[in-house]
């Protein structure tokens, strides 16, 4: 029976979210972070070392930068008790999964990727990706019990996960950073005052990405080996569009738009998407 949860990296945004989540589940929560908390919640115990934090824990949750996760896995394993669960939530899996596979078989390693941020109120209907380590069904059952009501989606392996994330996260973050850089010398409040739906939606996404932990942004853009080829293609497409606009080539631009419309219409109802956008934000 699970009674004690240890969270390594409890002072980060996601770490604090995890603390709240497990407290709501009535577990005894203790946490460790290199950053000393400004205030210590009465229902969370702050530990002075990883060893102190994980030694009696039934579940150890890692919420640390991706680049540090493999080393933290190895350190936690040294002090964890038999039959404990070691769960990590990194957004890039390749090196992390390799580290989990090296852990002793007396603990249960689980690799998940919550497809939501610390702004989520709960886990109901939220997507959580699961990369199997040793026992797929057992890991699925544990993840489902820890994050009740969520949609656990099993990804075949770390390679498939990272390839997908290079598109659905890495490329999105890259494009939004370009957008932010393009407007960084403008008066944002003035743009917001006169903007319509398109700018409002785009700026909300852009600003929410800027609210992310810098370590998350850097890991998504620097540590995913599959992202570079997509960035290369984006830059190539941007140059082609620039030349099309610079030469006032109306026919080519409209041809590009029509080709894209036909492509997306094969798998999505773009008119319905337009309606959902207005419905979602009530603009």
Image (spheres, rainbow, N blue to C red):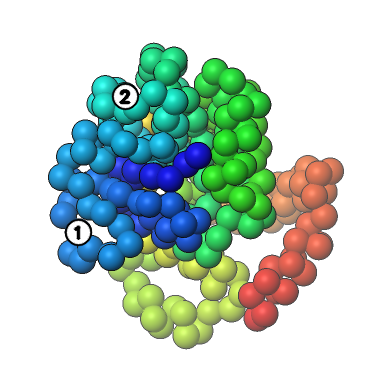
**Quadrant that contains the C terminus:** bottom right
Q: Is residue 67 left or right of residue 221?
A: left
For the residue pair 94 and 81, the one nearer the viewer reads as 81
Q: For the residue labelled by badge 1, is the local secondary structure a helix, a strand or a loop?
A: loop
Residue 202 placement, left or right of 260: left
Q: In this figure, what is the number of numbered marks?
A: 2
Q: Horizontal placement of 100 versus 214: left or right? A: right
Give the residue at x 59% y 78%: 196
x 32%, y 28%: residue:
80
Q: Is residue 215 visible?
A: no
Q: Position of residue 11 (x, y in %)?
A: 27, 54
Q: Is residue 192 left or right of residue 122?
A: left
Spot occupied by residue 67 in the image (x, y as percentages of width and height): 30, 32
Asked which quadrant contains residue 128, the reply is top right
**Residue position marked by numbered label 1 in the rendering:** 37
Residue 45 location in percent, x, y? Answer: 26, 54
Picture coordinates of residue 218, whole percent (x, y): 33, 42
Badge 1 vs badge 2, beta-carbon distance below 8 Å: no
Q: Nearer the viewer, residue 220 or 95?
A: 95
- Return the residue at label 2: 77
| Residue occupying the point 33% across, 32% down | 69
Which element carries disc 2, helix, strand or loop?
Answer: helix
């Amino acid at each position: 029976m699970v009674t004690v949860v240890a969270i390594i990296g409890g002072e980060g945004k996601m770490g604090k979210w995890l603390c709240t989540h497990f407290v709501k589940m009535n577990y005894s929560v203790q946490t460790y972070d290199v950053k000393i908390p400004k205030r210590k919640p009465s229902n969370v115990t702050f530990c002075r070392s990883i060893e102190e934090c994980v030694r009696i824990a039934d579940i150890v949750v890692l919420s640390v930068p991706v680049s540090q996760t493999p080393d933290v896995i190895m350190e936690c394993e040294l002090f964890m008790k038999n039959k404990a669960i070691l769960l990590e939530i990194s957004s890039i899996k390749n090196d992390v999964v390799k580290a989990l596979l090296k852990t002793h078989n007396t603990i249960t390693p689980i690799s998940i990727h919550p497809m939501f941020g610390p702004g989520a109120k709960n886990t109901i209907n939220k997507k959580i990706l699961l990369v199997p380590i040793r026992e797929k069904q057992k890991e699925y059952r544990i993840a489902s019990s820890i994050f009740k009501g969520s949609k656990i989606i099993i990804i075949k392996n770390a390679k498939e996960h990272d390839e997908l994330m290079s598109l659905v996260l890495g490329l999105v973050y890259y494009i939004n950073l370009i957008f932010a850089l393009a407007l960084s010398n403008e008066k944002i409040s003035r743009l917001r005052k006169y903007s319509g739906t398109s700018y409002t939606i785009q700026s909300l996404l852009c600003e929410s990405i800027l609210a992310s932990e810098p370590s998350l942004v850097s890991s998504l853009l620097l540590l995913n080996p599959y992202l570079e080829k997509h960035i290369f293609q984006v830059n190539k497409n941007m140059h082609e569009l620039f030349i099309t606009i610079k030469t006032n080539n109306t026919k080519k631009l409209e041809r590009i738009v029509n080709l894209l419309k036909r492509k997306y219409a094969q798998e999505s109802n773009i008119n319905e998407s337009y309606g959902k956008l207005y419905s979602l934000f009530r603009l």
